[in-house]
Each structure stands twice: as C-alpha cells, then as structure tokens.
Amino acid sequence: MRKKVILICSDCLSRNYSTTRKVENSTTRLELRKYCPKCGKYTIHKESK
C-alpha cells in the first residue's frame, strides 16, 4: 500500500510537490533535492508530517 505525502521546501516552507511512498518503508522522512519556484533555485524538500 502507498501513502500520499507532501514535500515542503526547507528554505521558504512552501508546499510545492506531492508524491507517494510505500507505508512499509517509512522509517525516515523523505528528502529530495527539487526546484522551488518561489525561491528560484534547487533546495532540499522534506516530507511533511
């Protein structure tokens, strides 16, 4: 089963992306380096609570 998660920019805290991840493997939070349109640069995006 997969769970929908929202990714938040670590600099400006805007919620830019949504993705899915497996429930069985969710021991740590997902962190991806993605483009933030509000900041205008690539930043770390973390999974929200």
Image (tube, grey):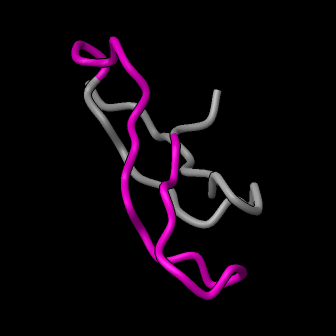
Question: Which stretch did the figure color magenta?
Answer: 23-46
Q: Quadrant of the N terminus?
A: top left
Q: Residue at x 23, y 17 (%)?
A: 25
- Asked whether, in this view, residue 33 is left or right of residue 40, the answer is left
Q: Is residue 40 above or below residue 42?
A: below
Q: Residue at x 52, y 38 (%)?
A: 47
Q: Quadrant of the C terminus?
A: top right
Q: Residue at x 42, y 68 (%)?
A: 34
Which is nearer the eye, 7 or 19? 7
Which is nearer the eye, 20 or 27? 27
Q: Position of residue 48 (x, y in %)?
A: 62, 36
Q: Is residue 46 above or below residue 36?
A: above
Q: Which image quarter: residue 29?
A: top left
Total marks placed: 0
Q: Position of residue 19 (x, y in %)?
A: 40, 52
Q: Position of residue 36 (x, y in %)?
A: 58, 76
- Asked whether, in this view, residue 11 is left or right of residue 18, the answer is right
Q: Residue at x 56, y 47 (%)?
A: 6
Residue 14 is one of the magenta-drawn residues: no
- Asked whether, in this view, residue 46 is left or right of residue 28, the answer is right
